[in-house]
Amino acid sequence: MNITLKCFAGLKRHLPAHAKANQAEVEVDAGISVYQAIDHFNIDREEAYLVILNGVFVCPPDRDTMILKENDTLALWPEVAGG
Amino acid sequence: MNDDDLLRYGRHIMLPEIDFEGQKKLLAAKVLIIGVGGLGSPVAIYLAASGIGEISIADHDIVELNNLQRQIAHDEKSLGQSKVSSCANRMNAINSKINIIQLDIKLSGEQLLSSVAKADIVVDCTDNLKTRFEINRACVQQKKWLVSAAAIRWEGQISVYHCGNKDSPCYHCCYGLRESGSKELDQTCSTNGVLSPVVGVMGSMQAIEVIKLIIAKGDLLVARVLLFDALSMQWESMQLPKNPDCPVCGQVQK
């Protein structure tokens, strides 16, 4: 199935070559969890601390159980704490 | 307000959302800014210029040369001075009518709690997760509004936490697992770098949210986090649900 993967800041390097700006349409196996999708693209789970599914933050404990659906948008950001 | 005040704040008073009543609210407000570095500089300068009646500023650092690339409250003349006194001088030069309380200490424990208790709004402009967690706990305990932003490299984020409201998420709902995670809690500007105007953008937005809170107008960034990627010039809005199992705010009743 297809989902939209958006990667920001330093995570942008994980996007496939056909990506435009910060996002790409990508194919993943049906029934995979949020964490399985992140692993599929070889992204460090801790580096992609802010996980946003269809605009809503996914709490870390839910990332193993939340299953992606066709046409979902998964956005990944690193943590930001400086100032 | 006297004639000078009407002249000074005229461009605010022209805005129908502020008007005389809103400016009077700003003049009566008490705001605590924790950290007067990259984020805290624009927050302190804009809030002083806007006429916030009482502004407490807390920081325990001194001004160093490597701060001047982005910490615009300080200048070459203040090298070696405490950041708090340097920032207070800048604020006072802009607006000598407001009351500036200088807290030249590492605000923590009981001192943090009592300073938070005295403020209407707390602005988190610190540079590390450990301090951010402690400020969040203090705001939840004291049921205070927390306007929190962060910046690093080319990225920024901002949110407003209605601490003490049983339906509102807190900072811990978002970053809580980082506190006990395996990764080091040292993602700071001093170890990763930061583009100078990124802290200006995020700090200016904190000042906007503080003013909106005081005048009770507009839509606040409550339960919503704005994320900014300056390199691609993209903004992302993220809804932040309350974590009912959050150890900090999960038991709040109101």
Image (spheres, rainbow, N blue to C red):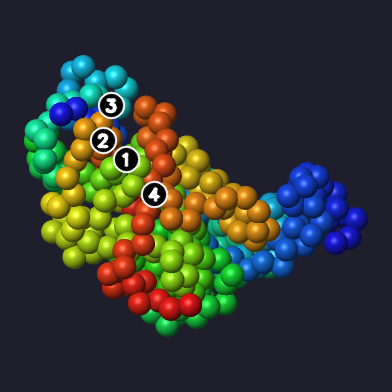
Query: Do the numbered discs 3 and 4 sit on residues whose CB atoms are within 8 Å?
Result: no
Q: Is residue B14 above or below residue B172?
A: above
Q: Which residue is mark 3?
A: A23
Rendered residue at 21%/44% (across/down) = A48
Q: Earlier in the sequence, mark 3 or mark 1?
A: 3
User: Are both tags, 2 and 1, on one chain?
Assistant: yes
Circle 2: residue type? Asp
Q: Which residue is mark 2?
A: A72
Chain under disc 4 = B
Rendered residue at 56%/66% (across/down) = B121
Q: Which residue is mark 1?
A: A54
Q: Which residue is mark 4?
A: B239
Chain under disc 3 = A
- Label for residue B203? none
Q: Which quadrant of the structure image shows residue B210?
A: bottom right
Circle 3: residue type? Gln
Residue A72: where, in percent of width, then height?
Answer: 26, 35
Q: Nearer the viewer, residue B189 or B87?
A: B189
Q: CA distance from mark 3 to mark 1?
A: 13 Å
Q: Is residue B114 above or below residue A6?
A: below
- For label 3, the SS is strand
Q: CA distance from mark 2 to mark 1?
A: 6 Å
- Nearest to viewer (mark 3 / mark 4): 4
Q: Is residue B163 above or below residue B202?
A: below
Q: CA distance from mark 4 to mark 1?
A: 9 Å
Query: Do the numbered discs 2 and 1 sit on residues whose CB atoms are within 8 Å?
Result: yes
Circle 4: residue type? Gln
Mark 1 residue crowding within 10 angstroms, few (<14) / some (14–19) / many (20+): some
User: Are both tags, 3 and 1, on one chain?
Assistant: yes
Q: Can the viewer see residue A2?
A: yes
Q: Which quadrant of the structure image shows residue B133?
A: bottom left
Chain under disc 2 = A
